[in-house]
Amino acid sequence: MSVEQLLIEVVYALPDKQTLLSLHVDENSSIEQAIKCSGILEQYPQIDLQKNKVGVWNKAAKLTDILEDGDRIEIYRPLIADPKEVRKRRAEKAKEEGRADKVTGGRVNPLRGGKS
């Protein structure tokens, strides 16, 4: 009995370089098995599957998820800054400068009428 082969892709991107690898894996292969088979871990030793998140076609996935034909596994780099914290700091700065409004996320200064 032969094992069916799936064609999948593994992608990883740095700010200045993107790598896309196409490969065949056995059906019922997990995301982790495919990543290891792709050789991408040797190309990018900074990838730590215990820390880096992964997804399939831009949807979060687990390393144990089973692949389907045509899946694209994406290995994500860790965020440098938490987006919520960045928005919070931007809103606080706008409030301090008196230019807070619905766009910046702070409360409008009633003495300034909300406009600069």
Image (spheres, helix red, strand yellow):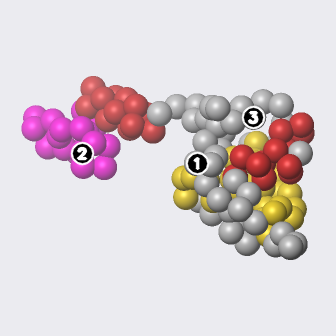
Q: Of discs 1 and 2, which sits in the foreground?
A: 1
Q: Badge 3 local density, few (<14 within 10 Å), some, or many (20+)?
A: some
Residue 46 spot, x, y in % from top left? 78, 30
Q: Which residue is mark 2?
A: 101
Say which of 76 and 7 sits in front: 7
Q: Is residue 57 shown to the viewer in this render?
A: yes
Question: Which label belongs to residue 25?
Answer: none
Q: Residue at x 70, y 53 (%)?
A: 30
Q: Kindly identify the amino acid type of the residue bearing the numbered disc 1.
A: Lys
User: Circles 1 and 3: CB distance less than 8 Å?
Assistant: no
Q: Is residue 108 left or right of residue 56?
A: left
Q: Amino acid at mark 2?
A: Asp
| Label 2, residues with CA under 10 Å away: few <14, some 14-19, many ≥20 | some
| Chain-order first, disc 1 or disc 2 | 1
Q: Amino acid at mark 3?
A: Ile
Describe the element under mark 3 as helix, strand or loop: loop
Residue 88: x and y, percent? 34, 33
* Residue under the point 61% across and 54% down: 65
Magenta extent = 97-115
Label 1, label 2: how many angstroms apart (C-alpha)?
A: 40 Å
The label number, if any, that marks residue 47 in the structure image = 3
Q: Is 39 included in the stretch rendered in magenta?
A: no
For marks 2 and 3 on the same chain, the one whose residue lies earlier in the sequence: 3
Tell me if residue 37 comes above or below residue 107 in the rendering: below
Q: Position of residue 49 (x, y in %)?
A: 69, 36
Give the CA separation, mark 2 to mark 3. 41 Å
Nearest to viewer (mark 2 / mark 3): 3
Q: Is residue 60 placed above or below 109 in the rendered structure?
A: below
